[in-house]
Image (spheres, rainbow, N blue to C red):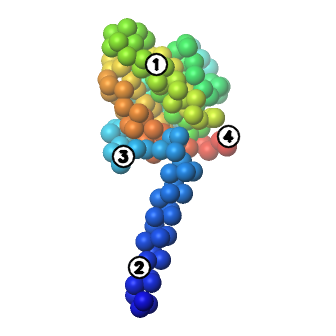
Amino acid sequence: MNKKMIFWLVGAALLGGGWVWQFVMHGAGEIKVPYKDQAIYLAEQGRDHLDLGVDHPPYSSIPPTSGWHTPDSHVWGVSKDPIPDEIQVHNLEHGGIMIQYKPGIDKSTGNNIIEKLEEIGRRYKSKVIVAPYPKLGKNIALTAWTYLDKFNDFDENRIVGFIAAHIDQGPEFVPD
């Protein structure tokens, strides 16, 4: 065998080994096909702290992706109750992701969307919250600091891809 052929065989083996390692190490939350980020970027509305219930200018999106927020954050995980906008924004500032759904979507679609969203949320020990959001026009909304993606049909790859692209991207890094 000549040196050129050995070089190509070693390269192919390393590449194949890398793919296997990636699959073994990241199987549970792996993006199954290439992810195309469909989120829209929204200009930051600041990072001012205020007490819950204090009036402030309107957010530029529903749900919000930045702006006025409380100094308190919500515990990561699954919530059966809606989370006030001003608390959500503080979680986003810390690099968190909100997965929110329109209440009653399982009745209107006949699917177990809420259960599927909660299952995705439970894969992450921190930085992800799943909760209902009554003001949604679409069935599902994903938010990160200055990013929003809203859609109607459950798409696991889209959700997991959004999380991978935007988790820990807030202006304040808070370790797990």
Please state which of the two labelled residues, at mark 3 or mark 2, is closer to the viewer. 2
Residue type marked 1: Ile
Q: Are marks 4 and 1 in contact (CB under 8 Å)?
A: no
Q: Which mark is residue 33?
A: 3
First-in-chain label (2 vs 1): 2
Query: Callout 3: few (<14), some (14-19), or many (20+) C-alpha neighbours within 10 Å?
Result: few
Q: Give the spatial CA distance, label 4 vs label 3.
A: 28 Å
Query: Callout 4: few (<14), some (14-19), or many (20+) C-alpha neighbours within 10 Å?
Result: few
First-in-chain label (4 vs 3): 3
Q: SS of the residue at dot 3? A: loop
Q: Are marks 4 and 2 in contact (CB under 8 Å)?
A: no
Residue type marked 3: Val
Residue furthest to the bottom in view is 2
Q: The N terminus appears in which quarter of the rendering?
A: bottom left
Q: SS of the residue at dot 4? A: loop
Q: Is residue 147 visible?
A: no
Please state which of the two labelled residues, at mark 3 or mark 1, is closer to the viewer. 3
First-in-chain label (3 vs 1): 3
Q: Give the spatial CA distance, label 4 vs label 1.
A: 25 Å
Q: Give the spatial CA distance, label 2 vs label 1.
A: 48 Å
User: What residue is disc 1 on?
Assistant: 114
First-in-chain label (3 vs 2): 2
Q: Is residue 128 visible?
A: yes
Query: Callout 2: few (<14), some (14-19), or many (20+) C-alpha neighbours within 10 Å?
Result: few
Q: Give the spatial CA distance, label 3 vs label 1.
A: 23 Å
Q: Image point 56% across, 44% down: which residue? A: 168
User: What residue is disc 4 on?
Assistant: 176
Residue type marked 4: Asp
Q: Image point 40% across, 44% down: which residue? A: 32
User: What residue is disc 2 on?
Assistant: 8
